[in-house]
Image (spheres, rainbow, N blue to C red):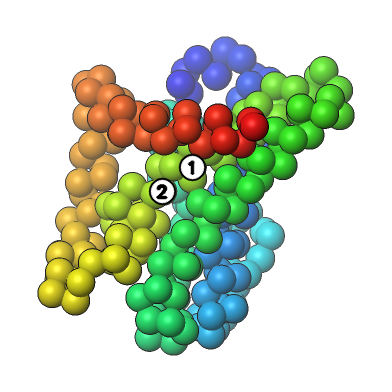
Amino acid sequence: MLFRLLNQPLDLIFLGIALVIAITFHELAHAATAVFLGDSTPKLEGRVSLNPLRHLDPLGSLFLLIAGFGWGKPVPFNPNFVKYGKWGTALVGIAGPITNIFIAFVFITILKFGMVPAAFVQLFLTIIFINVVLAVFNLLPIPPLDGSKILQAFLPESKQDFIEKMEHYGPAILLTVLVLDNVFGFNIIWSLINPIFQFILNILSF
């Protein structure tokens, strides 16, 4: 993906803009939700901010460029300070993907009503694509992705140690799968998220 974009500078610029928008608002949503639910940690860490530099993760951004999947810098928060226990933690987790889906919906709506000059249509399509992909990818229930926090809320107490173990091995598992997909062409992640991706796009496109 990256090598193709290097031959198409305008597409690379559009992708960069889309990444900044998607990741910044995704991580800001996590931070703002945690603060709203009672934990001041994200605010103290300077994460309740629209400054992209506070939210972009170099490795996550690189994978988005190379593979089309990636992540931002995780927002630090203390689940013990968040209201509603594990459900509050799940709300913090799902806030990012929901925000990305909302952004995609806004840009789709603007496109559908024809309020975009032709020169910016491709930019809008790129923003929509990246936001939906970022949302769906982060809903996978693998730590440190947001889906693991949502899964944890639905697991009984007797199974909570499963998530704790996954937190140790999740990043390695995720990185391994990304390498298998992009180096050896296994296409594991896209086969998992593509049906959900298409479903969300169909809903947003009404």
* For residue 30, side relative to residue 154 (left or right): right
* For residue 62, side relative to residue 149 (left or right): right
Neighbour class for label 1 at 10 Å: few (<14), some, many (≥20)? many
Q: Secondary structure at mark 1?
A: helix
Amino acid type assigned to the residue bearing label 1 in the image: Leu
CA distance for labels 2 and 1: 6 Å
Number of labels in the image equals: 2
Amino acid type assigned to the residue bearing label 2 in the image: Asn
- The residue positioned 40% from the left and 73% from the top of the image is 87
Vertical position of residue 5 compared to residue 66: above or below: above
Label at residue 68: none
Tell me whether the residue at label 2 lies in contact with that at label 1, contact meaning CB atoms closer than 8 angstroms: yes
Q: Quadrant of residue 37?
A: bottom right
Q: Can you identify the residue that label 1 sits on?
A: 134
Residue 124 in picture, x, y percent from top left: 70, 30
Residue 112 in picture, x, y percent from top left: 76, 27
Q: Secondary structure at mark 2?
A: helix
Residue 160 in picture, x, y percent from top left: 19, 71
User: Does the rendering let one see residue 16?
Assistant: no
**Is the C terminus in the top left, top right, bottom left or bottom right quadrant?**
top right
Q: Can you identify the residue that label 2 sits on?
A: 138
- The residue positioned 53% from the left and 85% from the top of the image is 38
